[in-house]
Image (cartoon, rainbow, N blue to C red):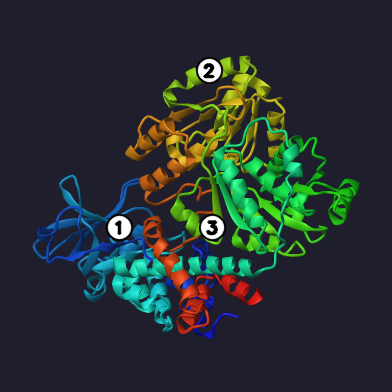
Amino acid sequence: MRPEALNSLFVEIDALEGVGPKLRRPLEKLGLARIKDVAYHLPDRFVERRAVTNLDEAGVGENIVVALTVREHRSPSGRGPFRVLAEDGAGNVCTLTYFGRASYTAKKQLPVGESRWVAGRLDQYGQMLQIVHPEHVSDSASAPLGQLREAVYPLSEGLTQGRVAGLAAQALKALPELPEWIEPGLLAREDWPDWRTALREAHKGPNAPARDRLAYDELLANALALMLVRQSNRAQRGTPLAGDGALRGKLRLPFALTGAQKRSIAEIEGDMAQPAPMLRLLQGDVGSGKTVVALSAMLIAVEAGAQAALLAPTEILARQHYETLRKMLEGTGVEIALLTGRDKGKAREAILMGLVDGSIQIVVGTHAIFQDTVEYRNLALVVIDEQHRFGVGQRLMLARKGRRTPHTLAMTATPIPRTLTLAQYGEMDVSRLDELPPGRQAIDTRVVSVERLDDVAGALARHFETGQQAYWVCPMVRESETDDIAAAEARYAALKERFGDEVVLVHGQLRPEAKDAAMERFAAGEARLLVATTVIEVGVDVPNATLMVIEQAERFGLAQLHQLRGRVGRGSEKSTCLLLRGASLSETARQRLALMRETQDGFRLAEEDLELRGGGELLGTRQSGDTPFRIASLEQIQKLLPMAHDDARLLMERDGGLSGARGEAARLLLYLFERDWGVQLLRGG
């Protein structure tokens, strides 16, 4: 149950004055459904204005408030703007310019002969001073002079700045007083305001301590919740699994294990031998050999007389894993099965029976393997591929499938900077595969101007003559009128004209059956070229595909470029990645492309990406639903997350957890940021 002290914050937004069904829709688009959401809907920036007695005191480009007398209305001949000529007390003339429907309001607000206070940005058009679309027009000085500093909020269609500011003011009035959850010494050292003051100050002006305090609250809630998950997991009864190595000894691997693989397998083996269930994340770059490490873990479970399951995010990936593992397991006598939502009738029945009686020792599949109808004889290990697609809540659901809590090994091919690993997987131990297996050749990466498109198409033709396949990745699905982004559909049409049925198209808006069919044709070698949007980042393994073309590469983050490049170079042949760039490059884009040529170390790219962006879309997080934070910026995550982590540990280990005085306040924090699964776990565990 949510603590009573927070009830006023979780009231539906309709409780605010002026919110009816019509306004609800645009507010919901911004994720504003309750009072709390509005209070935390912080301004993007602030407009600072200066009050002047006449226009001589103001500079062009400055935001000002000035009293003007309206002299004339000039309606456009044709499609031009509506202009209002006005003058200040010193006789300087200024044009107030309105486009489109705004002219109706202007006529009403600015009657000829009347004096009005006008707020807006002063610009120059030819010889004439002008203010385009004044932000405020008022017949008294108090309103615009009271807004010399004005918050600018993120909006959606149907909302105005004034409306959102009014709702925020109401929400801030409804804030209750809450006890302090931050460690007193830290609060004093950082000189942060209390929670309620911080929220109010953040809406008033650019206040770094207030903003940092709010970001810290969010990071602390997250760190605490993950720590509770970890604690609860340690208290669960798992099944200690110790294998005798008999099955692992029968594996006929085509290559020797790297040092990083051996180290990771040893860490996993140590975890699985413990009575508490393992909760480990295996981070490995594309092609670093995660599958072999996962297979070793699954064989430890089978050697110990238990079952293992591998969960993949898509059907294509599940099939691919199944085929890879089936080949590796040849000669071991281990029974492996594939179960997806597609399986029906007798085939499905047979798999379900095999899982119940234990004759199937390893199962690979999509979410179908965890449906209520699927029972296991003794499921003791769950391997989750592409970890970021499964939230903590889903991981916990899986944990309930075994007789006891199964060991969990999560894998991700997205190299994540250390700071963010803490943010997203703080409840897990982490193993890193930071060496590439022997025999993997470096991918030749080149940057090519988009003007050489014909040369690239010619290179494709020569590439196909050698019997090899290629990918062509475009940034968007359809061309929007305002954007010059080469759309996958248009590029597919052009390439199909040249190469005919050799080309297939895959993008996120296709029906799943059509997408699977195209992927299967490509994987089987029936199609030579796969044109796609970034949906192929995670997934398909086609060793015969040795050329990757990424169009408008400067529009992608380093993470995506690195993930996409990793789709080639999977066989023994030399592979190439062509980064097609536009004519004008920003400095960041230039550095990104240079880094791609320089290194194939995903972990290094992850850290560099964090440095280069300093914000916005971040490595591996755009695919993973962004960072798990709404308030904390990337910069704040880097600066404050380690502190929040230490504070959470201090609370749990020194200050009596959630039962002491600070613990009670921390419980409110968990509910406030809806990390309450942490508290529920504690209760359930």
Give the mark, 1 or 2, whose residue is nearer the N terminus: 1
Q: Which residue is mark 3?
A: 425
Identify the image quadrant of the C terminus.
bottom right
Look at 50% across and 66% down and name the residue there: 222
Q: Is residue 266 above or below residue 92?
A: above
**Observer able to see residue 624:** no
Look at 53% across and 16% down and name the residue there: 458
| x then y, percent, for residue 322 | 74, 41
Under mark 2, the amino acid is: Ala
Q: Is 278 positioned to the left or the right of 35 in the image?
A: right
Q: Residues within 10 Å of mark 1 (few under 14, many from 20)?
A: some
Q: Which residue is mark 2?
A: 459
Q: Residues within 10 Å of mark 2 (few under 14, many from 20)?
A: few
- Which residue is more in the foreground, 146 or 369? 369
Identify the image quadrant of the N terminus.
bottom right
Under mark 1, the amino acid is: His
